[in-house]
Amino acid sequence: MSGEPEGRRERRWREVHDRVYGAALELFLAQGFVATSYDEIAERADVARKTAFNHFPRKIDFIGEWGQRRRSQVESTLRPDLAEGADTSLLLRHYFEQLVKINAAERPLTRRMFGAWRESGGPFDADIGDLAEVITRMIAEGQRLGQMRRDVEPRRAAVLLYSGYFGTLFDWVAGTDAEPPFDLQDALTFLLDTVLPGLSTPGE
Amino acid sequence: MSGEPEGRRERRWREVHDRVYGAALELFLAQGFVATSYDEIAERADVARKTAFNHFPRKIDFIGEWGQRRRSQVESTLRPDLAEGADTSLLLRHYFEQLVKINAAERPLTRRMFGAWRESGGPFDADIGDLAEVITRMIAEGQRLGQMRRDVEPRRAAVLLYSGYFGTLFDWVAGTDAEPPFDLQDALTFLLDTVLPGLSTPGE
């Protein structure tokens, strides 16, 4: 419409999008999710309030993008492991290990985003989220490869891992920014050590 | 103050409380949690609006009492099992089995209450709820009796069971009132069969 080349328009859109997103997260971190207004986000991002709304129509969309970016970040580190025939238990361990690393590295932000997420539906909202889908697919693939027990419904196994992961995370975000109540990596190792043997075929 | 005997005052209070609670649950079931107003609850219970507010200051208090009543109901059926030295895994199985029975018997109400609960903080709100405390105590007792592995932090094990239970329930309330997407008892049996062996001492 504007006669601008498509590539440049997209780059601009993406640049503004990232700026609004970055400004919002800085404000959530500094003053909390609920206390942050669109006016403040727009001002910090140096865009019109309307522009901020165009990119993120509801505040919860910031949480959605935050979760999506984290999952993409984790998935990019797993590419090499996704080779045909990779060990499913190991793959799941790597996956959760990376998620834990990001959460632990950004504990103050994680605490604010998780609090806000819980108040707006949380991990059990409607479709139980993309992460459950990712895990379901990994377990189904493990069954195809004969590494995971085939008498287990992949979705049930995925929901157990998914719920245990978020239950542990919500327990971990209690306390203060500075002091986690327990070591998150240890807790996830316990979870996987407890659950994975029951999902794997004997000898695996 | 009124000169009425204490016992009669308490009975009256309890009678009104139960009537308000009952009226609210009937309305939640018939038209949903969000769509139900205090005016409607008060009218159906035949009390003043102010009285309904006195008994349940916030709508979420109905959900709190609903959860509390279910847990009491389950705990009353478990009394005989709570004898000194009872098998912890069996006790946990009975506990969850009773919870599942109540949920499955009241699927339409469970669906409405769970939806409303999720929107107002859900199972991961603040203290992660009484149920996690109950399970933590059962596991700690199992460790004391030498039935449960002592290198496991009871709270971590409880959070895994608690989260897996609620994750499964939130997956189960999807679909319609008439058609659950899977058998809840089977799903809980899978969960316990998968998790409990990892918590028990070898040979138990």
Image (cartoon, coloured by chain):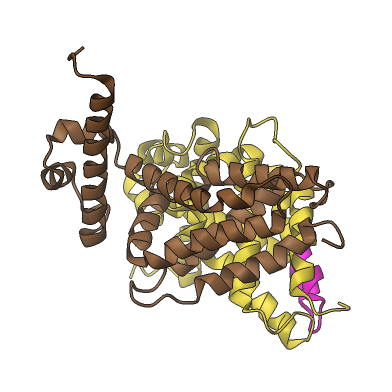
Chain colours: A yellow, B brown
The picture places residue A60, in percent across and down from the top left corner, at: 42, 51
**Which residue is located at x 76 percent, y 42 percent?**
A183
Tell me the quarter of the picture where residue A164 sits.
Answer: bottom right
Whether A139 is drawn above or below B51: the answer is: below
Which stretch appears magenta?
Answer: A78-94
Indicate the position of residue A120 as horizontal and vertical percent values. 42, 49
Residue A197, picture quadrant: bottom right
Can you give x and y, in whole percent of width and height, for residue A66 in the image? 55, 53
- Say which residue appears at 21% left-offset and 12% top-offset: B1
Principal SS element in the magenta part?
helix
Does the image show residue B183? yes
Q: Quadrant of the C terminus of chain B?
A: bottom right
User: Is residue A89 located in the magenta-colored stretch of the structure?
Assistant: yes
- Which of the 4 image quadrants contains residue B153? top right
| Residue B110 versus residue B44 in the image, above or below | below
Q: Nearer the viewer, residue B39 or A74?
A: B39
For residue A88, side relative to residue B129 (left or right)? right
Camera-side residue: B108 or A129?
B108
What residue sits 32% from the left and 49% below the top? A50
Along the line of sight, which residue is nearer the eye, A36 or A196?
A196
Q: Is residue A184 magenta?
A: no
Residue B92 appears left or right of A112: right
